[in-house]
Amino acid sequence: MKNKIKNKKFILVGALISVLVLVAIIIGAWLILKDDDKSDTNKETATAAEENSQEESVPTDEIIEEEAEEEAEPVNTTSNEEETVEEASDDEPEPINSFAKARNSQRQAEIGMILAAVSQYIVEPGNSIDDFGVINSCSNPSPIGTGGVDLADQLVNIYLSEMPQDSQGGTDQDTGYTICNTADGKIQIEAPNAEAGEEIIVSR
């Protein structure tokens, strides 16, 4: 009977020891797993911190260069707009001014032809400025035409193919051009109908 009791005690003690060993093993395994989790978490935190520090650490030289480039390239919209307006005005001249300039050029050429013809006539032997009739002083110029000083009889078909007339209203009676004697004895031809404020005069 005593032996049976002792055997039961040994069995209980052994079972208890086995349970304690098993609990110890479980606790040890749990501690190891916990340490591994902490280690992994620390590694991940360290890696994330390194990546953040690499992204945030932009070299100072690059920042300075970028700022310098931004300052060196200002956007000047005002200048571009002014250039665009100037180009548009150059490409599209006002038709009125263009036509007026063309007519003034024609007037300049025609009074030059008249003065050249008068000069050629005068230098011919036996000819004189008096052949054209009375020519006023330049304070009151004489109109060229049948209603004033008629140059056509002496000049046309010899020095001129026809008597030039101002394109803006010139007629045989009044060609739109005038002739006069200057104070220093020269013959002066003028286009009084010149446009755009231009003064068109020739003298010799």
Image (spheres, helix red, strand yellow):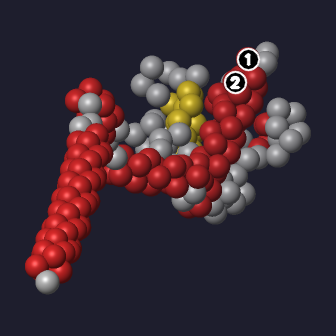
x, y percent for residue 35: 20, 54
Q: Which residue is label 1 attached to?
A: 123
| Residue 14 placement (x, y as % from top left) | 19, 69
Q: Secondary structure at mark 2?
A: helix
Which residue has dot 2 on it? 119
User: Residue 199 appears at what percent x and percent y?
Assistant: 47, 41
Q: Is residue 183 above or below residue 167?
A: above
Q: Is residue 52 left or right of residue 16?
A: right
Circles 1 and 2 in contact, beta carbons < 8 Å: yes
Quadrant in the picture for the N terminus: bottom left
The three-letter amino acid code for the residue at tag 2 is Ser
The residue closer to the viewer here, 113 or 197, is 197
Label 1 Cα crowd, 10 Å radius (few <14 / some 14-19 / many 20+): few
Name, please, the residue furthest toward the right: 157
Figure quadrant of residue 33: bottom left
Which label is found at residue 188? none
Q: Residue at x 74, y 30 (%)?
A: 117
Give the residue at x 58% y 36%. 189
Instruction: Please rate how many residues cluster around mark 2, counting C-alpha atoms within 10 Å: few if below 14, some from 14 to 19, many from 20.
Output: some
Residue 42 x/y as whole percent: 21, 50
Indicate left or right for 195 with 130 as reference. Answer: left
Q: Is residue 183 left or right of residue 35?
A: right
- Which is more toward the observer, 99 or 187? 99
Describe residue 103's horizontal placement relative to residue 201 as left or right: right
Q: CA distance from mark 1 to mark 2?
A: 6 Å
Instruction: Pick the quarter of the image with the C terminus.
Output: top right
Instruction: Let me know if residue 156 appears in the view.
Output: yes
Q: Nearer the viewer, residue 98 or 133?
A: 98
Q: Amino acid at mark 1?
A: Val
Q: Secondary structure at mark 1?
A: helix
Give the number of the mark in front: 1 or 2. 2
